[in-house]
Image (tube, helix red, strand yellow):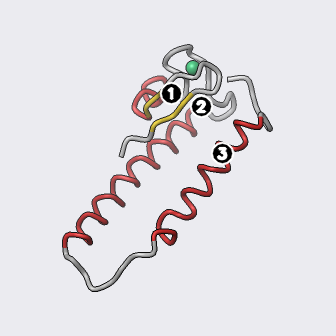
Amino acid sequence: MKIKLFHTVCGREILVQQVLQTGGHCPWDGKPFNKDYTAVLAEALETAESAGNVLENALEKIAGMDPSFIIEPDSVLGEMRMYIDSLNERRKSGGRSREG
Ligand SMILES: [Zn+2]
């Protein structure tokens, strides 16, 4: 899994690996994504991406076993989508926005 981010200040695309290299700052303009939580944010992004990889691998394995059940997509993706949507909505509406 490669989580793709867009910095709302410069609009450029960023990968989690780049955020880890800069310790929570935009690799293009050096601004922190959150001035209070640069390291914690970078760490959480890394956790999300590696957890995503674990989830993808497990699902691939499950699908490969051709089991006699179907998976309800929302039971897997519902909350993830909710958190992403809520983050994106906040950025778009400018609420709680901090410079950087
Ligand atoms: Zn930027």
The CA distance from mark 3 to mark 2 is 17 Å
Q: Which of the two discs, 3 and 2, sits closer to the camera?
A: 3
Q: Residue at x 50, y 41 (%)?
A: 43
Left or right, residue 60 beside residue 79:
left
Q: Is residue 7 left or right of residue 3?
A: right
Quadrant position of ligand 1: top right
**Residue depicted at 59% across the width and 31% down the height:** 38
Q: CA distance from mark 2 to mark 1?
A: 6 Å
Please tell me in which quadrant of the rendered image residue 16 appears: top left
Residue 93 appears in which quarter of the rendering? top right
* Disc 3 CB within 8 Å of nearest ligand 1 atom: no
Residue type highlighted by circle 3 = Leu
Residue at the right extreme, as displayed: 95
User: Tag on residue 87?
Assistant: 3
Task: Identify the residue shown where x is 40% and y is 53%.
Answer: 52
Instruction: Please state which of the two labelled residues, at mark 3 or mark 1, is closer to the viewer.
Output: 3
Per the image, the residue denoted by label 2 is: 38
The residue located at (52%, 22%) in the rendering is 12
Q: Amino acid at mark 2?
A: Thr
Of callouts 3 and 1, the N-terminal one: 1
What residue sits right under mark 1 in the picture? 23
Comes first in the chain, label 2 or label 1: 1
Q: Earlier in the sequence, mark 3 or mark 2?
A: 2
Task: Give the spatial CA distance, label 3 vs label 1.
Answer: 20 Å
Q: Name the outermost residue toward the left.
A: 65
Label 3 neighbour load within 10 Å: few <14, some 14-19, many 20+: few
Task: Classify mark 3: helix, strand or loop.
Answer: helix
Above or below residue 74? Residue 85 is: above
Residue 20 coordinates in the image, percent (x, y): 44, 31
Q: Name above or below for residue 44 compared with residue 31.
A: below
Label 3 close to label 1 by CB (< 8 Å)? no
Are dots 2 and 1 in contact, CB under 8 Å?
yes
